Image (spheres, rainbow, N blue to C red):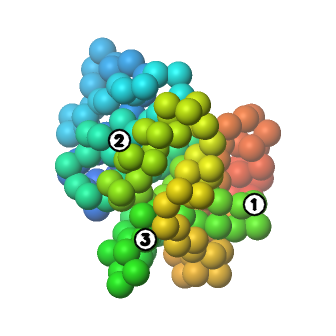
């Protein structure tokens, strides 16, 4: 729970402004599934986020897929729209991914179907690092400066994996 809402509720509220094809990849289907959300199992189980990307690219209705990790409460629709606009731009990269001083953020990025074959190859070879995929596809990195109009990149791209990370966000004052 972040400011009285689950991270999933926050993400669905933002992403449903952009698409009606919402997928939750991996894990079990809950007893009370969320309306308007498709649950998709990993097609190649046990391969972490790269396996999830593979399932999403295989099952999505659109040519592009937005991937957002389940622990990112502050991803916003305007930020995602910006990444999608770059993906549709004149150079049409295969991946549009934020890159800050913390490195790439491959779990808040846009991937096109052109990534499906390279992802499948990497899964078959058990090369499971998400950023390793970037060696095989055309990548457009979006800098922190380019993300700043949408909010503090550190906040927008924050992951809450541990109690320490949660307390750090609380100490800053939870926004949005």
Label 1 secondary element: loop
Residue 93 numbered mark, or none: 3
| Residue hosting label 2 | 56
Q: For label 1, count other residues whose C-alpha is less than 10 Å away and answer few (under 14), some (14-19) or many (20+).
A: few
Residue 110 image position (x, y, % from top left): 43, 60
Residue 173 image position (x, y, % from top left): 69, 57
Label 2 and label 1: CA atoms lie apart by 25 Å
Q: Is residue 65 above or below residue 152?
A: above
Give the left or right position of residue 92, taking residue 5 as reference: left
Residue plotted at (73% across, 35% down): 162
Q: For label 3, count other residues whose C-alpha is less than 10 Å away and answer few (under 14), some (14-19) or many (20+).
A: some
Residue 141 image position (x, y, % from top left): 58, 71
Residue plotted at (20% across, 39% down): 36
Label 3 secondary element: loop
| Residue hosting label 1 | 102
Q: For label 2, count other residues whose C-alpha is less than 10 Å away and answer few (under 14), some (14-19) or many (20+).
A: many
Q: Are discs 3 and 2 less than 8 Å apart at CB? A: no
């Amino acid at each position: 729970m972040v400011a009285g809402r689950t991270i999933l509720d926050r993400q669905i509220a933002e992403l449903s402004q952009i698409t009606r094809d919402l997928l939750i990849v991996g894990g079990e289907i809950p007893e009370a599934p969320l309306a308007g959300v498709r649950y998709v199992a990993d097609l190649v189980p046990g391969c972490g986020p790269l396996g999830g990307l593979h399932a999403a690219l295989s099952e999505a209705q659109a040519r592009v897929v937005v991937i957002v990790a389940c622990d990112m409460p502050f991803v916003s629709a305007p930020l995602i729209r910006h990444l999608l606009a770059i993906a549709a731009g004149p150079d049409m990269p295969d991946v549009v991914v934020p890159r800050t001083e913390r490195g790439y953020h491959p779990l808040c990025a846009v991937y096109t179907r052109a990534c499906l074959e390279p992802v499948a190859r990497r899964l078959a070879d058990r090369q499971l690092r998400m950023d390793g995929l970037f060696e095989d596809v055309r990548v457009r990195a979006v800098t922190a400066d380019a993300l700043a109009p949408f909010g503090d990149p550190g906040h927008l791209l924050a992951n809450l994996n541990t109690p320490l990370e949660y307390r750090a966000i609380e100490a800053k004052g939870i926004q949005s």
